[in-house]
Structure formats: C-alpha cells, structure tokens
Image (tube, coloured by chain):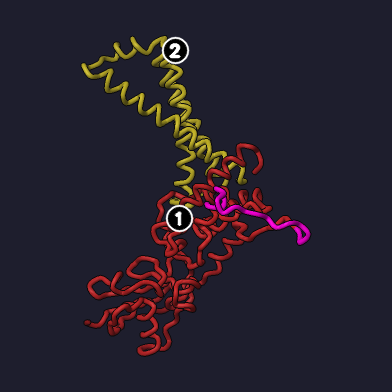
Amino acid sequence: MNAQKETLLWVAQRASAAVLAVCVLVHLVTIIYAVRAGLSAAEILGRTRGNLAWLVFYALFVVAVAVHAPIGLRSVLGEWARWRGKSRDVALLLFSFLLLTMGMRAVLVVFA
Amino acid sequence: MSPLAVEVWRGDAQGAFQSFEVPRHPSQTVLDVVTYIQRSLDATLAYRFACRVGMCGSCAMSVNGVPRWTCRTHVDKVARENKLLIAPLRNLPVIRDLVTDMREFFDKWAQAKGRFEGDKTRNDDCARVSPDSADRKKADAGIECIGCGVCYSACEVVAWNPDYLGPAALNRAWTLVKDERDGARIERLRAVAGDAGCHACHTHMSCTERCPMQISPTAGIAGLKREVAKAALRGKL
C-alpha cells in the first residue's frame, strides 16, 4: 500500500478516535443517568423509538467504530501475527462491514 | 573495592555468556571493564570503540539489559550487587561477541532519505537561516545524533516489525524536513510514511529515555506524523 493510502488510514483512525472519545463519554454518562433508578426494556424503547437525535448519535458511533477498530487491528495483526498484504486488508474490510452491519442493525431495531 | 563479576556475551546469535572477574577502580567506565578483559584476560574478545569520549557512537552495548554508550557509563551507576551483564545491542545481527552488524541500521537512514538534498547551485546566494526560526529550533533539537544505535536497540517496534525505519533514521529525516534549504521534502515525507515509517511508532518513548545525547526521536516522529498527514490531506504525498 502506498504512502498516501497508509497516511489517510492513520488520519481516519485519529479522526474516528476523536469522535469515539466524545461518543463513549456521552454513552457512559447516559447509561449511568438513565438506569440510576432501574430501567425496563419498555422504558428504554419508549425513549429511543422515533428519537431522531438518538438515531443520529448512535449511527455516528457505529460508523466511528467500524472505521477505528479495523485500522487498529490492522497494526496489531501486522506487528504481532506478522500478517500483512492484501489478504489482511480484505479480511479487515469484511470485519469493518460486519461491525457496521451489526451495529446499524441494533441501532435501527431500537429506533423503529 | 571488591572485584566486579562480569558476564560477557561470546559468539554470535548462538553464543553464551562467559564470566570474568575485573578489578574495580574509581570512575571506571563499562568500556574500561571490557577493555581490561580484552587486554588482560582474553585477547579474543571482539568489541568496538574509537573516541572514548562520547562522540563517535561506536561503543554502544547492552549493559544489564539496557542499551548504553559504554565509554560514558560509569560502573558505579549501572552495576547491581557488583555485577555486570554485558551483551551486544539488541535488534541487530551479532557478528561476534559484542560486535553487531550495523548495516541495516544505516541502510535505513538512506531509505528514510537521510541525506541533505540541496536545490541551489554555487552561483546562488547563501541561504540565511535565522537561529530564532521555529523550524531551525526544531532541527537543532535533533541534530546532535551520533549514530550509536542505542535508540534502535531500545525500540520495541523495531523488534516487532523488522522493516520499521527506527528512531534514529526518522529523527534524521525530521531534522531535514525542518531544514529550509532542503529540496526533497515531499520525497522524504513519502519515504517515512506508513507501516515501516513514522506511523508505526507507538510512542513508547524508549528511544527518548535511552538516547545518550538527550534527543527525543519520539518528538521528531510525532512531528513527521503531522507533516506527512498534512501533505496526504493536500494530496501531495
């Protein structure tokens, strides 16, 4: 892979990390706040269904994860398992797609 | 002072440690210890040194598990219970005893485009670089490298990824990127980008911790990451 692509992957990972830093914080604070007095599945769905702000926030969260995790895993596989080259990138593209599909599926089910 | 118990690596990668007993002296350096062994106990011991005053960068070895310039390392500072374990630098092929093959270390300087590329001729005026300019100060911070290989030996990323250019070569590239007279900026940024270059650095800072010249290759590598990213985002890489 050439220098331009490698560098853009690095930039994408840094940018997605910045998004995740905010998302994780909001996510954790929301969980702690929402369940402080106990929470049922019906109550959760009551708040999330049809809530567009919630949908946008968690869709962004999922996209950031799908970008961030495979790029990090790419370095781990290269350094620890010495797996480099095209096969690694194809496998990680599939992994990214898996994260995106599973994440968006969960988001949409709780929204709709 | 009781004598020093010294274990010294003998042989190549397949070798073993050999024990020696060396008399102690005030202000004795690790290089003094190795020289005593070679001159008085076993003339077949192979090691490198030249200047003995911390300028040439040829006497670096692993001392009690830590890469150091042995000519400026006092035994008092590093001996544990009057014992020294002296081995060749890590991350480089061992030729014999304490002598490593430095070729890949210096070849990587060339791969990182560590050579100044002037773009002026003898007919042009001299470049005037202000000592106060921000770029000059950044170059100054990294320019005193003596090429001893201590940082390369201390680096975990080199151990994981044999293609990684390493702290010294990247530090050299950084000082040239910050040299306003240099004319090969983009080629150099391209050479130091990616999995074998600055982006592989994990910022463990072992190089910075161990550099005998108090250079921070980590800071230079972080600077390269920023410069390379800017060039890539502008589509110039």
Instruction: Out of B77 and B123, give the one closest to the viewer.
Output: B123
Q: Colour of chain A?
A: yellow
Q: Quadrant of residue B66?
A: bottom left
Q: Nearer the viewer, residue A68 or A102?
A: A68
Q: Is residue A21 above or below residue A59?
A: below
| Other-residue count near label 1 (Cα within 10 Å), few / some / many at <14 / 14–19 / ≥20 | many
Residue A30 falls in image quadrant: top left
Identified by mark 1, the residue type is Ser
- Residue B196 seen in the current view: no
Query: Is residue B135 one of those drawn in magenta?
Result: yes
Q: Chain of mark 1?
A: B
Disc 2 crowd, CA 10 A, few/some/many (<14, 14-19, 20+):
few
Q: Colour of chain B?
A: red
In the picture of the structure, the residue carrying the numbered disc 2 is A52
Residue at point 62%, 53% (across, down) = B129
B85 to the left or right of A1:
left
| Segment tinted magenta in the rendering | B121-137
Residue at mark 1: B216
The image shows residue A57, relative to residue B103, as above or below, that is above
Q: Position of residue B68 (x, y in %)?
A: 39, 68
Disc 1 to disc 2: CB gap under 8 Å = no
